[in-house]
Image (cartoon, coloured by chain):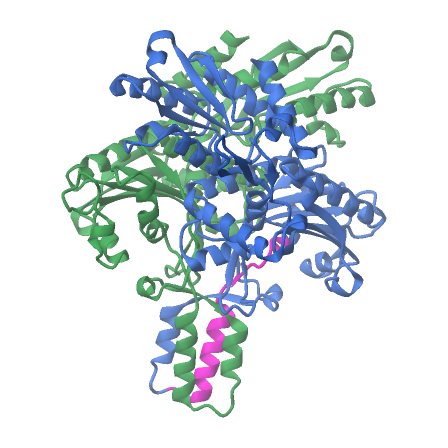
Chain colours: A green, B blue
Amino acid sequence: MLSYCVRNVLSRQQCILKTSPCTITLALQSCRRPCSSSPGEHLDQVGSLLQLCVDRYYVSPGQTNTELFQRGMSCSYGPLGMELRRNLLEQWWHSVTQSTDQVFGINTLSSSKDTETDGQRPLRMVESDHLKHILEQQEVSREQLIQKVQALIQRSPSLRTSFLQGALEQFVPSFELVNRKLPFGLAESGLCFQPSDGSGCPAEVTQTSLVWFCSPRTSSQWLDHWARQRLKWWRTFALSPSDFSSRDVPAEELEEAASRGVRIIYSFPWGQETLETLWSRGHTELLHTHKGVRSKLQWRDGRKSVPHVVSVTGNMDRGVMAFLSNSLQQLKREDRKQKLLRRKVLKLHPVLAPVKVALDIGRGATVELRQVCEGLQQEFMEAKIPVWPGYLETLPTSMEQLNAKYDEMGVLFTVVIGENTLESGLLQVRSRDTTIRETKHVSEIKNFLCRYISAADNV
Amino acid sequence: MLSYCVRNVLSRQQCILKTSPCTITLALQSCRRPCSSSPGEHLDQVGSLLQLCVDRYYVSPGQTNTELFQRGMSCSYGPLGMELRRNLLEQWWHSVTQSTDQVFGINTLSSSKDTETDGQRPLRMVESDHLKHILEQQEVSREQLIQKVQALIQRSPSLRTSFLQGALEQFVPSFELVNRKLPFGLAESGLCFQPSDGSGCPAEVTQTSLVWFCSPRTSSQWLDHWARQRLKWWRTFALSPSDFSSRDVPAEELEEAASRGVRIIYSFPWGQETLETLWSRGHTELLHTHKGVRSKLQWRDGRKSVPHVVSVTGNMDRGVMAFLSNSLQQLKREDRKQKLLRRKVLKLHPVLAPVKVALDIGRGATVELRQVCEGLQQEFMEAKIPVWPGYLETLPTSMEQLNAKYDEMGVLFTVVIGENTLESGLLQVRSRDTTIRETKHVSEIKNFLCRYISAADNV
């Protein structure tokens, strides 16, 4: 059983480099690589991806919502999209904090009242009642009115556009924690807010942030280290890793404080977009945040110099879309009557797939079969295997329709309980990636799934 | 080994009901129960708790920040506080979504431009540049100015104060997902924003939300079901479960839409505070959100009636403080010279404790001992056991000081690698809860920790 599962994982790895044998039999032509298709086909691909995301509970319906999603902004996610983003954030968290590099997680506020650093923050959290109250005052002159509104804005908290400022502020207590030794990092993930970019409305983004403090001498090496590490991370979960790439930021696009920058890029059907940006930022912002008090910032072996900062900022909403886009395989094949069949499979990495197993019933005594399903569901849930209770569905569906639906949802395995299960304890397990059906005993299915998932997790 | 670990867990369970034998030897007097101490002592307790939270990296330093923390608002958390809240949210998520009740996770936006439902939302996300631009226009009259500012506020997105509205909006697509069958729920957690409560500034809170849709006939039973389930959940992780209680909301405090309400309450040293609120809300808000279109809302066996809503809303920032307060044991004992010693232990539940194990070195060849530590750290991290690399600390500290520090951090086990380890592979493991030191072989320590944690997880 273990060898089967490892084999499966390995064949998945092979898929990444070349089409594996089991895919060849099905995939006469794969049309997902942008380079091999026309612009019309790209539009078609994008539309088809977005439709699938809505139909299969990744993204909530609605034109505005899918537009946000496509622009790489946070949107209303359905249950599967929500779980996919959760898994992605979880993996990011582990990759950043569970490395031998010393990284601590922190949590800073999304709003701040610090007037020193607020100058650049474009969004304010204003209490509309207070503003209304000012505007309704009859006796105030035009000038007084302007002054009052300005004062209100001034004392309204500003909303963060990134985690950088929060991490710079937390530098001092964290520095004490590591006994003033370098290097170390502060990690955070969550919501950031962006001012309107011409589309007319401010938006929110799920960002990840690693702010790395190191000696000035090593900052450029650390930038390269993290750029390599991040690119490797993105590619770990990719079906087609070459769609992820990294490149240096050209000199004319450098941020004010930065001396060098690297972008991690994903090639969407409509063009390239930035998933993550790394900057080597020097020490100017850190000094400014701590009002130039160098004594607070000097590390033990540092001979009075101030640490340099490398920032690594990711957009995980765009990350969700990148992996959905990357893992969607549209396969065409001819059936026996030479009719062209299309099969869409969301081949999300086992670790990212929101649903690992679907539980369904075949023909037979419904009440008893449902009881078996309930028992299995309980067993899976206790082992923390996300399960889709397909057996609760009472509308009649053919096995073929069901498989098509689960493939589009990216469900790793479908377990079917039939009359046979009641007699012999045997059930059918279908794999999303190989489409092969296997017979297993009901007692071994949980361990099989656990081993498959943990083998994939250790890749 | 397993029996040892199970025994440990069991003795922990006993601690909850009565002082366990191993605690008795140390704890001559425990002074953490509010009922047995004077008001002055309460103040002392609170001050001592807050100081410990700051000193031990749970909460970032600063008067404003600790005040936010004490008021049950989101604040800047240090690495340990951040991890504790993460663990708490993770446990909440599992308890809500991994039950046999059908609950789906969703993600909605924290800001909304829906003018229909915005009326009540008191906070707006305003672009300060746009407002400045309006205020700087010289040629505009006072009235025009007011109109322009009002229009800007009108089109600025409003920030959510709870997850309820988002869940009501997501009802229709989720309803299709379950084939219009009841009951089911939508779960979400994250940041919500609160208008100023007199203290002068809007704040943010980490909320959890379960919005449960059921038939009108069963809504009161479901309210009771969830109230029981939630109280049980809070108590699972408590050292002193009786500090958590639930009570019905008195008629005069009912929310407008609600017919009944239950509060889950924690008794802090300074008084009782609400951790979670459950409301039976009827169908008014659901109907209003969907503009009264009943056809969209009717379930399959429902004879044209509209589902009722039960909402369960928790404040996880206050939850973090409740568990910190609940798990802090201040023990006094006399040493051999009858000197009074105080020992503070943060007896956080093994599942919640942010650091499971600390790795330290005793006397011996430092370079070699550090290598053993690095190897063990790697092993722990691969097994996803959060580890504190105490061996990196180069300032000399006595073992007693170290234990006191780790007890205050709530670290479950301290592993000490000494010269002996290099010779025989044996190391010392000290338990936070029993203070007992045991000798174990380096090869069995990871499995020991894994079993201990997973046994605690299955409670």
Q: Is residue A319 left or right of residue B107?
A: left
Q: Residue at x 47, y 82 (%)?
A: B146
Which quadrant does the C terminus of chain A fall into?
Answer: top left
Q: Picture coordinates of residue B391 (x, y %)?
A: 33, 27
Q: Is residue A22 visible?
A: no
Give the vertical position of A439 relative to B144 (above or below).
above
User: Which residue appears at 63% of the width and 51% of the height?
Assistant: B37
Establish if A394 lies above or below B418. Answer: below
**B62 left or right of A433?**
left
- Image quadrant in which you'd find residue B374: top left
- Residue nearest the observer in this picture, B397 or B238: B397
Residue B399 visible to the viewer: yes
A441 in magenta = no
Magenta region includes residue B149? yes
Q: Is residue A334 above or below residue B80?
A: above
| Quadrant hosting residue A144 | bottom left
Q: Quadrant of residue A19?
A: top left
Percent x, y of residue B384: 46, 26
Residue B412 rendering spot, x and y as whole percentages: 50, 29
Nearest the viewer among B90 and A8 is B90
Query: Quick one: quadrant of the N terminus of chain A?
Result: top right
The residue that appears at 43% across and 18% down in the rendered structure is: B428
**Residue A456 located left or right of residue A184:** right
Majority secondary structure in the magenta region? helix
Please determine whether, in this image, residue A459 is positioned above or below residue A295. Answer: above
Q: Which residues are magenta?
A: B140-166
Name, please, the residue furthest toward the front.
B337
Rendered residue at 33%/11% (across/down): B422
**Count of numbered circles on the image:** 0
From the top left corner, tell me how far across and down residue B452 is, in percent: 56, 22
